[in-house]
Amino acid sequence: MRNGLVYAAGLMAGAALLAGCDMAANIPEAARGTGEGAIELAEFPDRPYWGDTHLHTDNSIDAFGFGVRLGPEEALRFASGEEVTSTTGVKGRLARPLDFLVIADHSDAMGATRRLYDAPRLLIRDATLRRWHDMMHESPQQSQRAVAELITAAANGTLPKGLTEDPEAQAEATRDIWTAQLETLDRYNRPGKFTALAGFEWTLMPDGNNLHRVVMFRDGSDKTGKVAPFQSIDTRVEQLWDYMDAYARKTGGQVLAIPHNSNVSNGLMFELTMPDGGPMTAEYARRRARAEPVVEITQIKGDSETHPFLSPNDEFASFGVAGWELGNLPLTQRATPAMAGGSYVREALKRGLSIEQRLGVNPYSFGVVGSTDSHTALATADEDNFFGKHTGNEPANRNRALDPQNLGTDIGRFGWNYLAGGYAAAWARGNTRAEIFDAFRRREVYATTGPRMVVRLFGGFDFTEADWAGDWVRAGYRRGVPMGGALKDKGKVPTFLISALKDPDGANLDRVQMVKGWVDASGELHERVYDVVWSDMDRRRSSGGKVPAVGDTVDRKTATYTNSIGAAELRSVWRDPSYRHGQRAFYYLRVLEIPTPRWPLYDAVRFGIKLPADAMADAVAQERAYSSPIWLKPKKRK
Amino acid sequence: MKRPGWTGEPLVHFLIAGAVIFAFFAWRGEEVDPASRTISVDREQQAQIALGFERMMQRPPTDAELDSQIERYVRDEVLYREALRLGLDRDDAVVRRRLAQKMDMLASAQAETEQPSAKVLLAWYDAHPERFADETRYTFDQLWFDSEVAARSAMGKVRSAKDWRRLGQAISLPPSLTGEARDEVLARFGEQFLTAIDLLEPGEQWQGPVRSGFGWHLVHLRAREPGKPRPFAEIANTVENDWRTATIAARREEGYRLLREAYKVEIDK
């Protein structure tokens, strides 16, 4: 029998000997570059293209340890609509494919957990690394515990030296992974059909405070192959921008960065000062605005729009806040109310106005997208197809909604705090790398918490209801600016063309709100949420500035809802009732769906588990879209 | 030079390579045989140890370090062989899973890096026309209504209407699509609508109402053209991706089946 086994091993090993090749041979020229000139473009962006800018695969140090064994190829196949078997053996396919994907593996110690896993045990001299090696081999649960320890160590700067000691050797390993990945991206990039963008996550985390950015490239491997992902260890954000500038200079290509999870930054993501505490310089503000035109506002690890503490009059401010609000990423430091201002997007947009008033430059003039930050290599964002934050909470783990999260101190965050994830929508004239990237660059993008609502916003000074009768999209572009744009204050009241169409396979719409932030003459910051248009307006009369709740059709016992309330589409032309000449302001839309089950409720029904009271209270929510803002800027004074 | 057809079969490559490896192992048999009481650490083995050290510590070992690594290697080898003699590998879940994974990897490693010839890809393309055809394309006009009643009442007027576009309610959906790909229709109108219009026969009549996630539609389905095959030259890359994915899975399965056939499995009910 032993001989038979050796023979079979030999048989299988034989396959491995016949390697060696050039896989790039069949990639069409157009798929290797930016896709400019490859397809016919629409005159105006005519539909939102859907994507995920933040997906991890088995090359990420934490994802591999959490158990994922799917790589970039499987990630691209899944996102583009093919069937893929998840690491835990569940077959899955997106009912509606995505249009684009950014694979954003951690640049630090890329592939390191895999190397640790594969390393001969006797050569691992560091006691901690050897323990992690053993845990990774022992069982999936132990492996997840090892990675939780690893993330905490990374957050605390106590990673064992073996992982970080020789940056050159690590850089070489990273380059190998990067080169292979760039080629895979080119192989799956199909201009006009599916866009595969290169990227990585830069994981700066001083004292566990999350300052992570996803870095996203416009170009194909001919340019991106000339650099390697930039490491975060012992760096500052200005060095990331230096790296990005150097890339543009060296290759003529383009790159941008997308900050995310400001909600677990303990106030550091959107500071009023420089990172070192000194007064912010105009140069810093200019560089930040240029490098980081878009922020990820919502994802699996919570929603960063705002917090009830910052927006006490906003009755919808608490979405995706539970658990995450407690402190920084590994919960090594609790959050205090004073930190909230630097942790949420709406407040950051306000701070930007005030800094601009002082310095003449707005560092926080960004648009917004949603994404998943999934560590399963599967870009799922719907409540009824949640594949988990990582492989340890894929649906194979029936208890995942109740499990305590296994990062850091373990206290206070539970599985049910995870959101199902978000998606990014890009208004582009076609589906190519250049068109998608350029939409991000001009901030003509928006975020959803998963559903694919179609949200249009144009700002101008002369829009009227009569515009709906004609080609209003053309009118919007001709006589105004789309989301992400800026209006020059001419002493006239700004008006907005607003349209929100429901996800055809999702829930009806409750309402569309305009969120306005502004800075007054004395420098004080203000915000206000206006209900602009809602379903059944004749029956749901606004009283005392409040629109009555839309209702709730969710059956908690079966995790179902009906579209018997709400609207398919909501449109309005809105004039700012509180306009003041000379005031700096921003305006963005928040579109709310009717209440629907969140994934823990689907889990509870599917697996017959009982949710505790606080999870149950959060088991139904109003999914939403956030548009990028339009800014109103005073004319330049001399 | 013309070779017989069987020389191109991957399974044949597989078997030949397997035989080569077997011969190799047989020749080196003494060294891999755990029953042997001789442990020889030759130059090659020492180089391996040094390389492993370098990978982990990211610098080459000093002589003293190499000596101590070799000493550890010998120690582990002694204990490893004794463990095998005692059969300790048999009930160990980690060893079991790790070895199973290695077998899987070996089976598919070739397909992961192999450059298939154009001939192989063309054969793959010919064998799976449905995977490489263009999408079905749709040409239709549609009107939207928020209720079935409104849709039915418009149905009576639509044939005689001068401008059918005026009959529908306002919504941000294109009233007409011409030769649009299935995925585009799916993105704009959703699954429910697509399923519904797949049940309609194309023709000159308005049909419906049909249901979508938005409400109700009258549809004039002018044409539904099944996707034509796309020329191989245009999609060689897609064919290669598909070949690779399918071949990796097939090789793993094939490798497993070869082994599985030698077993009789009894599962108590």
Image (tube, coloured by chain):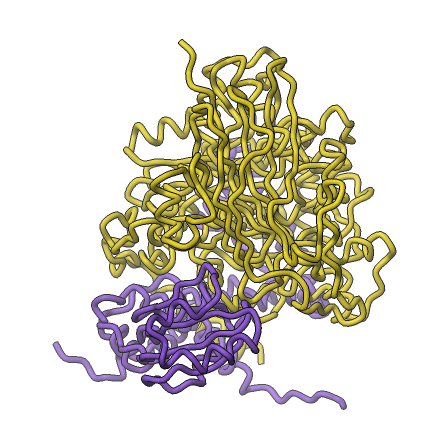
Chain colours: A yellow, B purple
Write the residue at 65% across / 67% down: A563
The x, y position of residue B248, in whole percent, is 43, 70
Say whether residue B100 is visible. yes
Q: Vertically, is A54 above or below B143?
A: above
Say whether residue A378 is visible. no
Write the residue at 69% across / 70% down: B90
Front-most of residues B122 and A622: A622
Q: Vertically, is B151 above or below A221?
A: below
| Furthest-top residue in this view | A638
Question: Quick one: quadrant of the N terminus of chain A?
Answer: bottom right
Write the residue at 62% across / 22% down: A271
Q: Vertically, is A164 above or below B93?
A: above
Q: How many marks?
A: 0
Front-most of residues A3 and A163: A163
Tell me: A461 left or right of A212.
left
Front-most of residues A347 and A165: A347
The x, y position of residue A580, in whole percent, is 56, 23
The x, y position of residue A554, in whole percent, is 75, 65
Tell me: A584 left or right of B16.
right
Write the residue at 35% across / 74% down: B140
| Furthest-left residue in this view | B1
The x, y position of residue A459, in whole percent, is 46, 38
Front-most of residues A625 and A333: A625
Question: Quick one: quadrant of the C terminus of chain A?
Answer: top left
